[in-house]
Amino acid sequence: MHELILHHYDISPYAEKIRLCFGLKGLPWRSVQIPVVMPKPDLTELTGGYRRTPTLQLGADVYCDTKGIARAIEDVAPSPTLFPDGSEAIVPALQRWGETSFMMVVTVLMGEGGVFDEDFMEDRRKMVGDAIDLDQAGVIVPAKLMQLRANLDLLEQQLSDGRDFLLGDAPCLADLAVYHPVMMVGLVPNPKLKALVEPLRFVAAWLARIGAIGHGKREEMDSADAIAVARDAAPAEFRGQAAPPPEGLEVGQSVVVLPEEIGSGPVAGELLPSGPHEIRIRRRGERAGELVVHFPREDYLVVAA
């Protein structure tokens, strides 16, 4: 098995979700620090243009988006599971709901000011383009605070029967996904956000339990070394039952994967056999050689090039 290599930066909330996956499973992993803002030449050498944080590398296989990354980690180390018995649909649903809090918190921080420097703000302006006017975030801060209050109230109610974790006695991927946006509140000096969390005693105890999971066994790695690992490896063979490609497409065809979320570019390659929950494309990097890049089906489209 190839080493687990996470391309991330330490303050990334979504990367914290994956670091906690390593901790929950007690896994060793290599940490490659990437820039917070573009350009990210070593990352995009591997992904073909995907810029979001984090990305997981296993040899010459590159996994984009934490939904796909978590499934890849589960395949590598099935126990303890991220998806307890009978929760295959419940966990993704809770994950999607919990992560709606992320942009609520970010919008409040952008609208209030004093947290993000101008380089970060300019990078994010370019990232979202004309879709969102980040400089007007302050107008909707009161509304976002009320939305966040509603999410936190539901979280407090879910935990109020004394359970340790969202689905019972053991943590799962839903806990880690709901945790990282709420964790952000404790990392920044914003009194409006902290005022929402401070009265929630069940949430506070749950936050402490999740934080105590830790990050597994981390070892730093240079990005050039990670690219060399990809160059010297061969992509893993496909296992399992392939799902039919979208109508009008064929395996081996040149395609583009388009993220439906704002802010991450398309990635071009050759369509490969793919399971029902992922999209696999083959591409070639100038320095990394032949790669297979994996995306989750959720939030990503594959179309003819």
Image: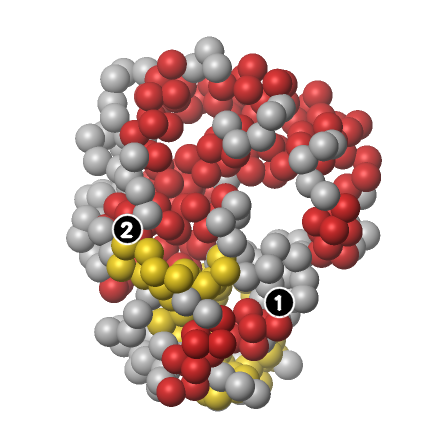
10 Å crowding of disc 1: few (<14), some (14-19), many (20+): some
The type of residue carrying mark 2 is Gly
Q: CA distance from mark 1 to mark 2?
A: 26 Å
* Camera sees residue 105: yes
Work out whether mark 1 precedes mark 2 in sequence or the reverse, and give the earlier one: 1
Residue 3 x %, y %: 30, 70
Which quadrant holds residue 60?
A: bottom left
Residue at coordinates 42% horizontally, 41% vertically from top-left?
Answer: 177
Q: Secondary structure at mark 1?
A: loop
Figure disc tally: 2
Q: Residue at x 63, y 61 (%)?
A: 264
In depth, the one of 89 and 167 nearer the eye is 167
- Residue 280: x and y in percent read 44, 74
* Rendered location of residue 249, percent (x, y): 53, 80
Label 2 crowd bin: few (<14), some (14–19), many (20+), radius 10 Å = some
What residue would you read off at disc 1? 40
Q: Which mark, residue 216?
A: 2
Q: In the image, what residue type sits under mark 1?
A: Lys
Vertical relation: 69 (above or below) 125: below
As drawn, is 243 to the left or to the right of 41?
left
